[in-house]
Structures are given as C-alpha cells and as structure tokens.
Image (spheres, rainbow, N blue to C red):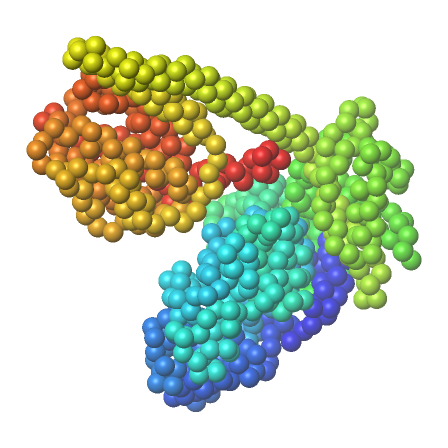
Amino acid sequence: MASEDKIRELIKNRMQDVSSNCLLTSCRVWLQVRDIMSTDVATIGPQQTMALAANLMADDGVSSLVVVDNCAVTGIITEKDFLERVISKGKSPVDVMIRDVMSSPVVTVVPEMTVLEAGRIAEQRRVKRLPVIENGKLVGIVTQTDLIRVLTSYGMWRDISEVMTKDVATIQRDATVAEAASIMASRGISGIVVMQANQIAGMLTERDLLKRVVAAGRNPAEVKMGEVMSYPVVTIPPHFSVFSSSRVMEKMHVRRLVVEDNKWLCGIVTQTDIFRAVEEKWRQEEEKNLKSLDESDTCVYTVGLDGRTTYVNPAFLRLLEVPDKSELVGKSFLPEKFWFSQKEKAQFLKELNQGTIHISDLTLKTNSGKRIDVTVYSSFIKNIHGQVDGSQGVVHDITAKKEIVTLKEAQKALAASEERYRRITEAVTDYLYTVRFASGRPTETVHSQASVAVTGYTPEELKKSPTLWLDMVHTDDLETVREQVSRCICGQDCAPVEHRIIRKDGNVRWVRRTLVPSFDSQGQILSYDGLLQDITELKVAEQVQVQLLGELEQATEELRDFAYIASHDLKAPLRGISALAGWISTDYGDKLGDEGKEHIRLLLARVKRMYNLIDGVLEYSRIARREKSITVDLNEVVSDIITELGVPSSIRITVEKPLPVVTCGKTSVKRVFYNLLSNAINFIDKEEGKITINWTDEDTCWKFGVTDNGPGIEEKHFERIFKIFQTLSPRDSVESTGVGLTITKKIVEFQGGKVWVESKPGQGSTFFFTLPKEQKQAKTVKILAAAGVD
C-alpha cells in the first residue's frame, strides 16, 4: 500500500501547476485505487467457522476477511458481523459457519477507478471495505482508512464539531460485555464509551470484542467492561479540524475519537464521520465545478485517449445547436455532420495527438447546417502520475470577427480562459491568500480579490508591501498571530485564531484566520494558504448576548432574594398571631364558649393557610433555579409520595404499569406528582376514591396522566385553575392555596414539556403532562456555560 508520505508527495507535485493538466471538469487530479490498495488481502473459505475467522483477524490485526471460494469473491466478514450476527444473538462462534453470516454480494471496485469515485461508492453503499477486482481476480482491497488518508491529504479544515455524533452511547464500567454488545448492535454502532460515574474510563470497540472476548473464548455475559475495554481514551477538543482529527486517528491507530470540552463528553467522531465529511466536501466541490461550467458562456469539452468525447458543457451545445449532449458524448470528436472539410478534421485530430498546447482555427457546421468559424485552444490532460489521460479544449466563436489571431494572442486568450475557469471554480466569499517560501524565507504573496471587501486593500497593494497583512493586525493581537504563523511554518498544529485587524479606512474588524501549510519531502515549508473570514457581526452578537444574559441573571437573582426576604418578614407576624391565638384558647377557653372557640379555630386555619401561601409563592419563585438532570426511577418517586401523603383508606391509588426511568430534575418531577396526587385526594367527593397513574412513550417525550373520579371541572375553568391563587371551591371547604397547579405548570414548562386537563363535571378529571426525553434545561445550561454565564 502506498504510504502517507508517498501519497502526499504525489499530490503535492501534481498540484504545483494544476491549471494546465487538470481536467476542466474536475476540481482535482485524483489518485487511482491501484495507487492506495493493499495487495496483501486476508481471505478465508465459506466452509470455515467464525471462531477460526476471529483468531485469524486477531492474529493479523485486521478488521475484515474476504471470503473466497474457488478463486471467486463470494462474501466478506467484518467485526460488525461478529457483533450483530453472533455475539448479540448469543451464538457460539465455534458453531457458526462463515457462509451463514457473511455479507454477500460484495461491493467491489476496479484498479483504474479514482479515489473520489471509490469514496462515493463506499458512502452510497454504506461499506468500509472495497475488494479490488481485475479480470475477475482479487488483486487488492481498499479500506475506509485508505480513502480518508488520501482525501484528507487534499486538505480539509472544517471543525470536527460539525461532523461529530452528539448522541454518544455510554455504559458503566461494571456492566457486562453482553450488555454493551446488545446496545451496540441495537444502535448499529462500532464502539461504546465506558464511564466511571461521570468520568470517561475507556472505550469498548468491535475489535476489543473480537480480540479479547471472542478470540479468547470468553463468555460475554460474565466479562465486565473494565476487563476488556481500551484505555486511556484518545480525546480531542471540538475545535479540531477534520484534517487534524484524521491525522490523530492515523497516528494513534484508532478508528474513533472522543470529543471532550473541559472534561465534558460532548460527542464522538468515527472514521465513518470523517469519511462522510471529506467525501461530501469533494463531491460538493465537483458538483459546484460542473455547475459553474454548465452556467458558463465559455464552450468547454474533454476527450479521452480513445478519441471519444467525454464531456461538453451547455454553451458548447448551444454553439453547435445540439439539443442533447448524447449526440456528442461517447462519440468521436466531432461527428462527420459538424465538419465542412474532412481534410481539416484529419489535420486537427492529428495535431490533437501531438501532445502540445496548440490553437486551431476551424470552420464547422451547426446542427441546422449554419456555418461558424471557431478558434480551439486545446491541451493534453494528465493523471496524477504525469501520464496522458486525454485532452481538453476551449472553443470561441469568432464568426462575427472573422480575423486570424497570432499565436501569441491565442496563448494569452488560453491563459485568460484558464484564469476565468479558476475564478469560476474557486469560492471567493472569503479572503484567500498564499505565502510562498524559498530556503525557509517568504518570497512571494498572492491575494484574492476578496481582500478588498475584508481589509480594504487591493491584492496589488498587499503584494507590493509583503508585511502589510501583518501591519493590519491589532497590536494587542500581534503575538497571537505571530505564534500561529510560527507554529504553521514549523509544522506544528496551527489551529484557527480569531483576532482584530485595522482596515484601510481605520475601522477595526474581527476576523478568523486559518492557515494550511505545504512542506517538501524534507519537511521544509514551501508555502501556506490563508483563509480570512470577517466575523465582526458574530463577535458583536456574542458580546450582546453575554451582556443580556448577565443582566437577566442579575435581575432574576434580585427577584429571588426579594421573594425570600419578603416571605421571611411576612411569616414573622403570622407566627405572632398564631402564638397569641393559642394563648387565648388555652387561658380563656372556658370563657369563650363554642362560638368563640370556633372563631379561634378559623383564625388559626387562616393563619396556617397564609403561611402555606407564602411558602407556595417562595417555591414558585425558586422554580427557575437550575436543578441537575439525573436518571430518575419514577416508580420510587411515586411510592415515596404516596407514603408521604398518608392516603385515606377510602381512596385507592393505582399505577397501571411500571413507570419509566427518565432523565430530569428529581426534586422537580417529585413536586409535579405530589401536587397532582394531593389535589386529586383533596377534591375527591366519592365514598370510594379512585386515582390512576398511567403513561405512554411519545417518541420524543414521555406523556403521563393522573386520573381521579372526583367532581370534575367545567371546560370554561380549564385555563383558570393553572393561574396562581385560583381555586374552584370555597377556601374553608377545601384547604388550598391556589398555587400548586401553577407551580406544576411552571416546573413542566421549564423542563420543556406542557401540562393540561381533560374533564367533564361528574365524571372525574385527568391531568396530563409531558417530559421531553432530551431536557431543554440541559441545552440552556450548555449555552449559558459557553457564554461564560453561571
């Protein structure tokens, strides 16, 4: 297999002057499958057992075996097949035959296919390994690792946070391998993060299962995660680029990286994620390039080694008045009916095979027979090895001018055409520049036209004064920029930096600078490409957001303090009234009479109600305080509440089916169930009270219901009962503050759910509420933390 250094050297050498050799219809000159495939392919017969396959894969350190029967490829066995079709099914590898579980038929490629085409096939068919077939025989294999190594060598600076998987599967260290295998199989993943409480302890992969469990003959149900997991885990921050992440995987010989931000597990990125990102990037660039050519007014064509046309753009079709490209593509350039002179055709095709850039003046006919005069600028195109791969051309209609141009003018026109092509295919929304080096010193800079929009300086001004780009940097940020450039030149990781620049007009702007270096085989810097993005508006928005969040947090805290102080001051006189009423009842009870004692009882009841009301208001004001979301078993929560409530013997509470385990604030969800159950108990007017708790799984949330056989509620009161201090019964008949349902509503909505009631008078009521499976509160905490707000 070609080494990484050899691949990068090939790409670097062929990209030095890609303008003259690259296909007009391609963004890059691509390596072929034969350049990167491994010819030492591990194989096995279909009659062998999976136990033998596990031992072979473990001993050879490979992740797959190609199944060959009588020299023909009939299937493939991978680590995933062991996980999904053997381990997770509880089968013994000794009893399972290769032919019964192998993946078949096998997706294959040919050696002449480009790596981009092979990558597209692997992505579309969702496979990580492509056996290479030539003349019906297995000659090699290309893996996802090989394709990633090549595709990222062409450059990829997208942040890893944009492609990572945020929904990370985890399992505790003391769990069994069988449990982990079940999770991995059900979710279709190849690895699971092992946790020790809230800390990352290790990683279990398909390879660990194969090598340390299956090949070792151990029972997955008896093996703990801590015995076979891989550790320590290789982690990266979310701002790492796709390119850098790929290099870390290759250096550490791993196929997945845990993304960690300040010791917080925020995602996982696999080879498949990186592969999809780079394949999608280059596919989009190829599509953008073809779209640019399709929209161009310049007539473009390409011809293969066999002399047949491989591409024509719409402008070329319009020039010849051809309605469908099938009349030209796949046929010899050009078919007979488009030539006025067969002698001129023969001469042109002869010159086309000479291997030099040349200009030809031709007289052609359109599809309708109209005569046109054209000038054709053609050249050979070569593959990444420098071998001729066909020819390309640009055609200009000179019918109106009908004048012969000199060779020098034609060469200038060809150069202008190629420059226009490069401008079409390049993304120029950001300021791009290149700094070239000789003997370790900068010698030349090249700047795109977008420099004017970002800096106010033209490319000519920047090129004339090589240090101007550094002089623009704000003095407080100079050290940061110098350090980034220094790390880039030395071949160290040079992550993007954000800093300020002073534009030509004196305005200060924020920019994000990304550098991509290129080195020779001795590690000496050849050049680096810079990308400067104006992020001023984003910075301003971030600052405003942080300021507003800070002001909101301060105002909220002040409101909470006020509620606490007010409640404390209000309770003091209530305690005095209660004590005084108690003394009167004790000291003068024999003189008060029945009516006086009743008045004292009502006074004490109202004092208690006021006391509870103050507690309710204080609790309502504290709801917005964050409570850490944890795993909560609702069966335990409801059982504790029923015990606390002291349910009368005349009322029966039934839980129709075991409640789920959810992720939320335990105190908050306990208060919701407590309020709903206590309300149901207080308002039941039947001799035999019935309260039922039920729930359903609504995909994105849990839906709960508390049903009673009480008096019911008229529909016109449905909204009123959730407002603070609102009750439907007289205060003295049912003890209620009118705060409980308001607190319930606020808690549920703060968790990201909703609450409502369904009821008919005389038929009882059902109070419903939902809890999202992914808590919005957790998202809010992450946003606030990112903004630096506690």
Taking the spot 47% from the left edge, 74% from the top edge, the residue there is 209
Count of residue discs: 0
Is 328 situated above or below 453?
below
Q: Looking at the picture, tell me which residue is in the foreground, 681 or 356.
A: 681
Q: Is residue 232 left or right of residue 683?
A: right
Q: Is residue 104 left or right of residue 427?
A: left
Q: Quadrant of the N terminus?
A: bottom right
Q: Is residue 428 left or right of residue 335?
A: right
Is 67 situated above or below 602?
below
Q: Quadrant of the C terminus?
A: top right
Q: Looking at the picture, tell me which residue is in the foreground, 187 or 179.
A: 179
Is 114 situated above or below 159?
below
Residue 489 appears in the picture as rendered: yes
Taking the spot 12% from the left edge, 37% from the top edge, the residue there is 650
Q: Looking at the picture, tell me which residue is in the foreground, 232 or 626.
A: 626
Task: Tell me where residue 682 appears, x and y as whole percent.
Answer: 20, 29
Q: Looking at the picture, tell me which residue is in the foreground, 460 or 511.
A: 511
Taking the spot 82% from the left edge, 27% from the top edge, the residue there is 504
Task: Tell me where residue 12 appears, x and y as whole percent.
Answer: 75, 61
Task: Tell me where residue 325 appears, x and y as whole percent.
Answer: 50, 52
Image-quadrant location for residue 176: bottom left
Taking the spot 36% from the left edge, 34% from the top edge, the residue there is 748
Q: Is residue 684 left or right of residue 663?
A: left
Task: Tell me where residue 14 appears, x and y as whole percent.
Answer: 74, 62
Residue 327 appears in the picture as rendered: no
